[in-house]
Image: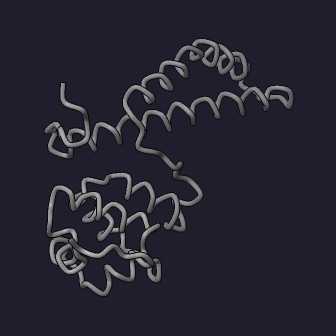
Amino acid sequence: MPRKATKAADNVYYKARIKAANNNDKLNSREGAAEVIGIDRTRLARIELDSICAYPEEILMMADIYNAPELENYFCCEQCPIGKHSVPHIEVLEMDRITIQIVSSLENIDEVKKELLDITEDGIITEDEKPKLDHVVKTLDKIEKESRELKLWVQKSFGEKGEFNYGNVAKH
C-alpha cells in the first residue's frame, strides 16, 4: 500500500488523484500519475504541495484522467487571476440536492420575470429600481450556479463521452 503524502493531504489535486487511484492503481504514486498525465514527477509533486500553480493544460489532463471535472472549476475560481473575479465556485453535490435547489429557485422565476419587465419597461432604471435589479441578477446568478452544479454532476456521472459512470452513483 502506498504511503499517503501528509504535506499534500489538503491539496485538491492530491485528493482527486488518490480518489481516482481506486479505479486506476497507477495513480497511487506520483510517478505513475505523472507518467499517465505526461508531466514530470517533481512538477506533479510541486503542484500537489502548492509550491507551484499548474498550467491550464495540466488541469484539463488531471480532470480527465482523475474523472474530476471539479478541478477545472477549482482552478478557474481559486487560481486563475481572471477567473477569481468571474467564475463562481461550484460543488459536487448529490443529484437529489441539486434537484431540490433548482426546483426551489425556479418556483420564483415568474416573479423574477415580472420584476425584470417592470424595471425595464420604460427603458430607464431609476434609483429605486436598482435594488430590484440587483435582486434579479442575484437570482439569475443562483440559477446559473445550480445549473453548473447539475452539469458537473452529469459530467462526473456520465463522463465526456456520455457513458454512465456507475462508480459515482449507486446501482439500482
Residue 72 is situated, as x and y percent measured from the top left of the image, at: 38, 57
Work out which quarter of the rendered image holds the N terminus and state it: bottom left
Asked if 151 appears above or below 83 in the picture, the reply is: above
> In the rendered view, how is the structure colored?
one colour
Total labels: the figure holds 0
State left or right for residue 104 relative to residue 21. Answer: right
Residue 43 is situated, as x and y percent measured from the top left of the image, at: 32, 84
Query: Going 16% across and 36% down the picture, which residue do you hit?
Result: 164
Query: Going 20% across and 43% down the picture, which residue do you hit?
Result: 167
Query: Going 18% across and 76% down the picture, which residue do you hit?
Result: 38
State left or right for residue 88 relative to residue 114. Answer: left
Residue 157 is situated, as x and y percent measured from the top left of the image, at: 25, 39
Q: In which quarter of the image is residue 142?
A: top right
Work out which quarter of the rendered image holds the C terminus and state it: top left
Asked if 66 appears above or below 79 in the picture, the reply is: above
Query: Going 43% across and 79% down the picture, which residue do you hit?
Result: 49
Residue found at the very far front of the displayed protein: 1
Q: Which residue is nearer to you in this view: 71 or 30?
A: 30
Asked if 12 appears above or below 167 in the picture, the reply is: below
Residue found at the very far bottom of the displayed protein: 42
State left or right for residue 82 relative to residue 59. Answer: right
